Image (tube, helix red, strand yellow):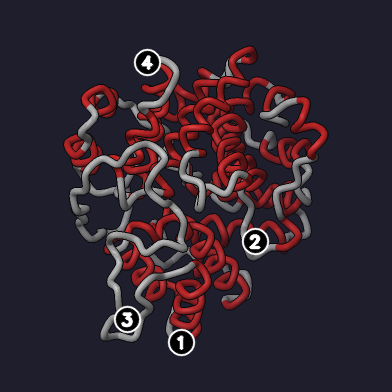
């Protein structure tokens, strides 16, 4: 398998992380004692430690849900423009890190709506600062443009030109799944239209993110993984992918595992996901899968980073614990793009082993949400 190409390319891409990003609010999370593994509730049903117990003076709810935050931002965008809504989304996610669990799909929706509002004028759509929530707005806009295209095979090469930034090509990957109606092989063929391996890999990141965790608002794009094939191969369809596409597939596979095991109400499944990744050992995908677990664990638990780190500490051996920590670091620095964010994360970790891995983390691509 050649997924090491993925690791090399994505480590290189991290060097570009934050270039052109809008300024973000500095956030220093409240220090909380490291919780025992699998004991603290991760779901949106519990009141996050960072949330107020009563509504704010502005009338905002005490605890945001995906639907209440989405409705607020869509109304803001309708009344003003996408830039206002995205700035508010950035402010809210920095102040209340638990909202990061659902900010990316909300940003996708804003992107979809903006393309329709501006009559598919893509340059107008992306003229607003759009880096918040790992460029979810850009991803959604590219999805909508490809979905509306009469010739997506040609247009996918034009949308991101001439700069061909990673986040834009990642968005193309999402869009290929819309065009292909969730057919992985057809979507993969579309990603293969790019001339370089690095762009094909970046496109595949969006492809597999869309496969394992499709936009919640799109009823036609739900994860469609056959139970009989999953019973025979827990990490289906990753082992059957061409080598160039396997790493991205393994990286995003934990997204489906966590959602299908109701991580919101069963926090023990984060540690369980690391053990589940060992199913990919025979094909060499276990390390990429472990990185993916770390990334998802941080994404869903930004309001309790030491608890997230303790999940990585349950890995079966040092290489899997390190891979998980690489994922923690990767997502944290994707979400917090300001200089020094990675060092800030590592300085807060109380588990000595995980903190050490954090300090040596090379990270992953700045396109990985």
Q: Circle 4 is placed at which residue position?
A: 318
Q: Which mark is residue 79?
A: 1
Mark 3–mark 1 contact, CB under 8 Å?
no
- Residue at the spot 30% in from the left edge and 41% down from the top edge: 35
The spot of residue 265 in percent (x, y) is 51, 52
Gap between marks 3 and 4, in whole Å? 45 Å
Q: Residues within 10 Å of mark 3 (few under 14, many from 20)?
A: few
Tell me what residue is drawn at x 34 percent, y 69 percent: 87
Q: Nearer the viewer, residue 44 or 135?
A: 44
Gap between marks 1 and 2 measured at Cα? 23 Å
Q: Earlier in the sequence, mark 3 or mark 4?
A: 3
Per the image, the residue denoted by label 2 is 145
Along the line of sight, the residue nearer the viewer: 14 or 340: 340
Q: Percent x, y for residue 109?
A: 56, 66
Asked if 216 appears above or below 234 in the picture, the reply is below
Q: Position of residue 167 (x, y in %)?
A: 48, 47
Answer with the quarter of the image where residue 26 lies.
Answer: bottom left
Residue 244, above or below 318? below
Q: What residue is at 40 percent from the left and 26 percent from the top?
A: 314
First in sequence, mark 4 or 2: give its number. 2
Label 3, label 2: how far apart the Cα atoms are: 38 Å
Residue closer to the observer: 20 or 339: 339
Of marks 3 and 2, the one in the foreground: 3
Q: Give the mark nearest the N terminus, 3 or 1.
A: 3
Provide the residue designation for mark 3.
Answer: 55
The crowding category of the residue bearing disc 1, from other C-alpha atoms within 10 Å (few below 14, some 14 to 19, many at least 20), is few
Callout 4 touching callout 2 (CB < 8 Å): no
Element at label 3: loop
Locate the N terminus and report the quarter of the image it occupies: top right
């Amino acid at each position: 398998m050649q997924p090491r190409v993925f690791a090399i390319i994505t480590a290189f891409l991290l060097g570009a992380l934050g270039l052109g990003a809008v300024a973000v609010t500095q956030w220093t999370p409240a220090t909380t004692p490291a919780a025992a593994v699998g004991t603290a509730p991760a779901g949106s049903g519990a009141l996050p430690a960072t949330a107020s117990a009563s509504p704010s003076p502005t009338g905002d709810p005490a605890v945001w849900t995906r639907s209440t935050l989405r409705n607020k931002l869509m109304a803001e965008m309708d009344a003003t423009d996408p830039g206002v809504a995205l700035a508010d989304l950035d402010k809210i996610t920095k102040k209340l890190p638990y909202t990061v669990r659902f900010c990316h799909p909300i940003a996708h929706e804003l992107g979809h709506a903006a393309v329709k509002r501006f009559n598919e004028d893509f340059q107008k759509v992306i003229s607003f600062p759009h880096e918040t929530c790992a460029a979810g707005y850009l991803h959604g806009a590219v999805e909508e443009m490809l979905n509306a295209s009469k010739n997506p095979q040609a247009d996918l090469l034009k949308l991101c030109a001439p700069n061909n930034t990673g986040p834009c090509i990642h968005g193309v990957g999402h869009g290929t799944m819309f065009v292909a109606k969730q057919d992985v092989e057809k979507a993969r063929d579309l990603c293969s239209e790019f001339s370089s391996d690095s762009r094909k890999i970046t496109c595949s990141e969006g492809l597999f993110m869309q496969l394992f965790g499709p936009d919640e608002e799109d009823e036609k794009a739900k994860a469609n993984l056959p139970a009989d094939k999953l019973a025979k191969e827990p990490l289906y369809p990753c082992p059957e992918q061409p080598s160039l596409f396997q790493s991205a597939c393994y990286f995003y596979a934990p997204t489906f595992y966590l959602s299908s095991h109701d991580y919101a109400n069963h926090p023990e499944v984060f540690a369980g996901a690391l053990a589940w990744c060992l199913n990919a050992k025979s094909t060499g995908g276990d390390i990429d899968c472990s990185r993916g677990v770390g990334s998802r664990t941080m994404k869903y638990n930004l309001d309790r980073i030491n608890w997230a780190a303790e999940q990585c500490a349950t890995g079966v051996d040092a290489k899997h614990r390190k891979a998980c920590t690489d994922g923690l670091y990767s997502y944290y620095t994707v979400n917090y793009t300001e200089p020094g964010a990675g060092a800030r994360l590592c300085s807060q970790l109380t588990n000595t082993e995980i903190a050490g891995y954090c300090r040596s983390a090379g990270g992953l691509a700045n396109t990985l949400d």
